[in-house]
């Protein structure tokens, strides 16, 4: 349903040159209070709030943020409609230029890949890998998503639900790639995840399955590698009764082995009445000796939802 809504939106706005991909647009940056009742509230578990903003644009292709990368104030986000969103983010400014372009090469296969949900970058070469739902495929791109290089449909992902497939992607220092399904069920209320021993394009048929146990009634939607080697995961919950919520968890790669259930540890919870939405995308930076965590929401291209960007400092020291 989310993809169909996105496609309908693309059709409706495509006639407007001002909103077309490839054209620069304006992105509005509005500071907000994460806790409306306590605007000075800064401590959220092991996270210290540094800032919160609502992002808006007149470009109809802006939104649906499913994954992102932030380096020195430059944001590259990927929407779940296969669009790349790029802008410079300065906390002192209230607007910035937005560049929108479509992922290259998505219409060259029999079935186009339009629901891009997860991405990772090779820090040495800049090459990027993107996971797609519905088709349950992985595509590798050149640096900064400039050109499509290759794709693979791993057999282990074939039976993953169409709208709950490769949601979270992370690369470990030892060369392993981890890919988490949003909700392909495993034993004991777990979700399936895969280990690729090297480039998934080359090793897509040789995967190992393990099981990630998220908090009850939550599903993983993105993951990043922390400087100390652990994996931080954002887990999402939504229901019509209690709305949206997010739980941040960490897992230790040393616990990850084929066929094993990997348990997580909660470090922060974000839930109503906090000013949040469908929190889905993560990015991490090191600044002035601090580990900075960014979290963005996916508005599903729904006018009733918001694109929220949160900035935190990770307070905790490593504990086991």
Image (spheres, grey):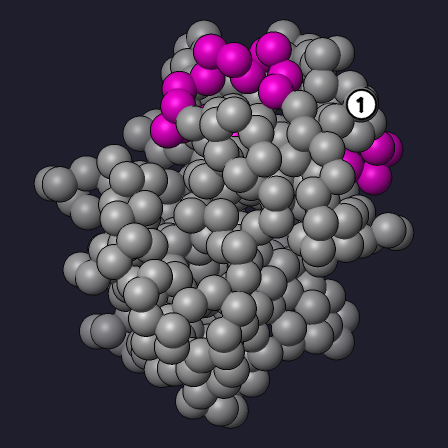
Residue 193 in percent (x, y) is at 57, 21
Figure disc tally: 1
Indicate whether 206 appears above or below 318.
Answer: above
Residue identifier under label 1:
202
Indicate whether 289 appears above or below 139.
Answer: below
Q: Residue furthest left?
A: 241
Is residue 320 within the magenta segment?
no
Asked whether 125 or 286 is in front, the reply is 125
Asked whether 239 or 137 is in front, the reply is 137
Q: Kindly indicate the quadrant of the structure image that contains residue 76.
A: bottom right
Magenta stretch bounds:
153-175
Residue 52 in percent (x, y) is at 41, 73
Q: Looking at the figure, which quarter contains the N terminus?
A: top left
Residue depicted at 59% across the width and 12% down the height: 156
Residue 242 in percent (x, y) is at 16, 44
Asked whether 288 or 224 is in front, the reply is 224
Task: Determine the secondary structure under disc 1.
Answer: helix
Is residue 54 visible in the rendered image? The answer is no
Is residue 159 visible in the rendered image? The answer is yes
Residue depicted at 44% across the width and 87% down the height: 95
Residue depicted at 50% across the width and 42% down the height: 116
Q: Looking at the figure, which quarter contains the C terminus?
A: top right
Left or right position of 49 against 2: right
Left or right position of 245 against 316: left
Residue depicted at 42% across the width and 48% down the height: 81
Would you say the magenta stretch is mainly helix, strand or loop? loop
Indicate whether 201 appears above or below 299.
Answer: above
Indicate whether 96 appears above or below 220.
Answer: below
Residue 167 in percent (x, y) is at 50, 35
How packed mark 1 is, by other alpha carbons closer than 10 Å (few <14, some 14-19, many 20 or more), is: few
């Amino acid at each position: 349903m989310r993809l169909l809504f996105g496609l309908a939106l693309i059709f409706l706005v495509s006639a407007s040159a001002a909103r077309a991909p490839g054209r620069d647009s304006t992105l509005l940056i509005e500071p907000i209070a994460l806790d409306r009742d306590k605007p000075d509230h800064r401590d959220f578990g092991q996270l210290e709030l540094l800032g919160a903003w609502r992002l808006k644009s007149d470009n109809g292709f802006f939104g649906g943020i499913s994954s992102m990368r932030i380096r020195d104030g430059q944001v590259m986000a990927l929407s779940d409609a296969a669009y790349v969103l790029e802008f410079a983010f300065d906390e002192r400014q209230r607007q910035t230029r937005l560049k929108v372009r479509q992922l290259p090469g998505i219409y060259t296969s029999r079935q186009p890949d339009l629901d891009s949900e997860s991405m990772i970058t090779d820090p040495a070469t800049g090459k990027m890998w993107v996971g797609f739902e519905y088709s349950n495929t992985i595509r590798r791109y050149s640096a900064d998503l400039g050109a499509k290089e290759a794709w693979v449909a791993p057999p282990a992902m074939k039976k993953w639900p169409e709208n709950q497939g490769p949601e979270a992607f992370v690369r470990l220092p030892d060369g392993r790639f981890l890919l988490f399904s949003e909700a392909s069920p495993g034993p004991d209320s777990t979700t399936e995840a895969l280990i690729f021993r090297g480039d998934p394009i080359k090793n897509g048929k040789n995967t190992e399955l393990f099981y990630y146990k998220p908090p009850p009634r939550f599903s993983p939607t993105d993951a990043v590698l922390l400087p100390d080697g652990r994996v931080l995961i954002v887990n999402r919950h939504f229901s019509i009764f209690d709305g949206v919520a997010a739980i941040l968890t960490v897992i230790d790669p040393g616990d990850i082995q084929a066929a094993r259930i990997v348990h997580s540890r909660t470090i922060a919870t974000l839930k109503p009445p906090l000013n949040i939405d469908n929190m889905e995308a993560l990015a991490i930076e090191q600044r002035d000796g601090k580990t900075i965590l960014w979290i963005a929401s996916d508005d599903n291209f729904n006018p009733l939802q918001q694109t929220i960007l949160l900035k935190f400092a990770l307070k905790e020291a490593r504990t086991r």
